[in-house]
Image: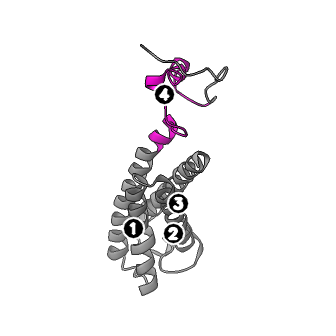
Amino acid sequence: MVRRVPDPGPRTPDPGSRIPTWFHSLSRVAPFGRLPGMNISSIATRPWLTLVVAAHLIISVVHGMAHNGAHVPLSAAGNLFVLVVIVAGPLAGVALMWWAEHVGSWIVALAMAGALIFGFLNHFVFASPDHVARVATEWRPLFETTAVLLALTEALGFGLALRLVQKSENVS
């Protein structure tokens, strides 16, 4: 016997949703009912964010190789920032996100925002040895490519993490 939950009225899916409309009606049937605040897009965002953070880690390693090859050293403070915020921050946030979505998402969002600002200023704004135009010619293509890819993954990671933060705040 299937117990039906009272119908709250007509339900329209999100206009941008790719979920078929018949799927939304399943949530009104008790065995298929969802927990309050649980939605398909929140569940689907976590794997994408995890993938972006993994890609960011790989690109960071390759960018670090370009730094070494082009003899572009960072200060002690710069190295500490890279290790704590750019490398460890997103990884710790993603690991925590699977158990505590709100806190983990905030950590990823803050780490990616910090990494984006740090990388953008150092690679594209400040006239320093870390600027893409000042890197040794033979390393410049790899350095520029990874600097741009880092900025893209950081912006995407920041946006996805904020999306999860917003969804988890709506549940509370």
Tell me the magenta residue range. 16-45
From the image, state whether disc 2 or disc 3 is nearer to you. Answer: 3
From the image, state whether disc 2 or disc 1 is nearer to you. Answer: 1
Q: Report the disc number at residue 5.
A: none
Q: Label 3 crowding class (10 Å Cα cut-off): few <14, some 14-19, many 20+? A: many
Q: Which residue is mark 2?
A: 119
Name the quadrant containing residue 140.
bottom left
Q: Which residue is mark 3?
A: 106
Instruction: Evaluate whether residue 38 shows in this view.
Output: yes
Residue 28: x and y in percent read 54, 22
The residue tagged with tag 2: helix, strand or loop?
helix
Q: State how far apart marks 4 and 3 are (Cα).
A: 28 Å
Do labels 1 and 4 touch, CB within 8 Å? no
* Earlier residue among tags 2 and 4: 4
From the image, state whether disc 2 or disc 4 is nearer to you. Answer: 4
Question: Callout 1, which amino acid?
Answer: Val
From the image, state whether disc 1 or disc 4 is nearer to you. Answer: 4
* Earlier residue among tags 1 and 4: 4
Q: Is residue 24 magenta?
A: yes
Question: Callout 4, which amino acid?
Answer: Gly
Question: Callout 3, which amino acid?
Answer: Trp
* Earlier residue among tags 2 and 3: 3
* Earlier residue among tags 2 and 1: 1
Q: Which residue is mark 1?
A: 87
In the rendered image, which quarter contains the N terminus? Answer: top left
From the image, state whether disc 3 or disc 1 is nearer to you. Answer: 3
* Earlier residue among tags 3 and 1: 1
Q: Label 2 crowding class (10 Å Cα cut-off): few <14, some 14-19, many 20+? A: many
Q: Report the disc number at residue 33.
A: 4
Relative to 159, residue 79 above or below: below
